[in-house]
Image (cartoon, grey):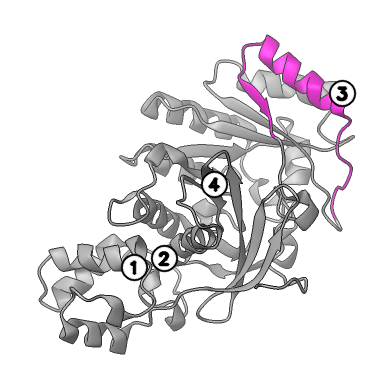
Amino acid sequence: MTDSRTRDPLPEAVGIKGLDAAGIESLMAEYGEPRYRARQVVRWLYGRAARSYDEMTDVPAGLRARLAGRLPLPFPRIIERQVSRDGTRKYLLGLGDGTSVECVGLPHDGRLTVCFSTQAGCAMGCSFCATGKSGLTRNLGAGEMVDQVRVVAEDLGGRPTNAVAMGQGEPFANYDATLAALRFMNSPDGLEIGARHLTVSTCGLVSGIERLSREPEQFTLAVSLHSAVQTTRDRLMPGVRGIPLERLRSSLAAYISSTGRRPSLEYALIAGINDTDVELDALLGFCQGLLVHVNLIPANPVTGGFEAPPAPSRVQRFAEKLLDHGVPTTIRAERGADIDAACGQLRQRATGARAD
């Protein structure tokens, strides 16, 4: 089962959650239905989170029956829920075909940010990230991404104000489905989250950055940099070893020129690896002349990976030097580390915590 653009087939159990908006419109046209039916279906799927076609009361019964007979309408179940001391919640969700995936809810000052996954597992193999250690299971459908945001919002009893594709997987390795999901989240028939409050984070796949620069929506871009020294970055991020830093920087410059938007550079500081003065100077050089914002992230413990966070003084030195050179910089206050919900810690596994 594929949507109207996705290259790789999705399991049949994904059903209608594998279709993008154009795919749903094509389906309605195939059935001889007026175009507005597609909006009705999308509204039920993502605006109202229907669990069955029977709930779609303004959709003709005959159409509902045809859809039910052809495309499953799955909705994820919470296998496990963990609650951090800081209020962060991590969820292990079971999808329609039995695949599991993790997502995170971060409530703060009346806002709710949901960190959702775009793939079950990941093929990028970053050495400081737990997700990639088990490899890639499969891509997720657009609706499976939206459903993660919906599940978290319902469980926390609030409206999602922000969503970030920073969970499991490389979003640009599943580009079409990720963009379809962001559009459903942004749509007035969907979650109604403002485009600038929807962020897609990539390891630096240049083709995806180039494609995003041509999209009409003002979605936010974040790039996992983690080192501006080629040998260090290749060691930390083997999945993008074939992409020279010069090419990545050129693609960011073109993105900024085309969109006028400021991407973020994610930089996870690891003691003795990328927190040296040589690495700092390289980072300053990379940022020179680019309209970027740097997020410094003290590395989180990952079993089997680099586990040494930097000394607070090294983090502060990076921040001060970047700011002195006119580069907007934030030291990210990591949340949920006590339940392995912080950056790089999602594993797609159960721990035995209760879901109720």
Looking at the image, residue 114 sits to the left or right of residue 282; the answer is: left
Residue occupied by mark 3? 313
- What secondary structure is marked by label 4? strand
Q: Is residue 330 magenta?
A: yes
Sooner in the amino-acid sequence: mark 1 or mark 4: 1
Task: Inspect the image, locate mark 3, and give the three-letter code of the amino acid beneath it.
Answer: Ser
Q: Position of residue 7 (x, y in %)?
A: 41, 66
| Residue type, label 1 | Leu
Residue at the image point whose x is 45% and y is 82% from the top: 13
| Disc number for residue 113 | 4
Q: Residue at x 27, y 82 (%)?
A: 67
Q: Does residue 82 appear left or right of residue 157 in this picture?
A: right
Q: Quadrant of residue 19?
A: bottom left
Rate crowding at label 2 as few (under 14), some (14 to 19) or many (20 or more) other CA atoms within 10 Å. many
How many C-alpha atoms fall within 10 Å of the one at disc 4: few (<14), some, or many (≥20)? many
> Along the line of sight, which residue is nearer the eye, 344 or 57?
57
Q: Given the image, on which type of amino acid does mark 2 rest? A: Gly
Q: Where is residue 233 shown, x and y percent of the image?
A: 73, 39
On the image, the x and y values in percent for residue 340 come to 76, 56
Amino acid type, residue under disc 4 in the picture: Thr
Q: Which mark is residue 143?
A: 2
The label shown at residue 82 is none
Quarter-of-image position of residue 214: top left
Indicate yes or no whether the magenta region holds residue 302. no
Which residue has dot 1 on it? 45
Does 204 appear above or below 319? below
Q: Is residue 123 visible?
A: no
Q: CA distance from mark 1 to mark 4?
A: 21 Å
Nearer the observer: mark 1 or 3; the answer is 1
Q: Which segment did they paint magenta?
A: 305-332
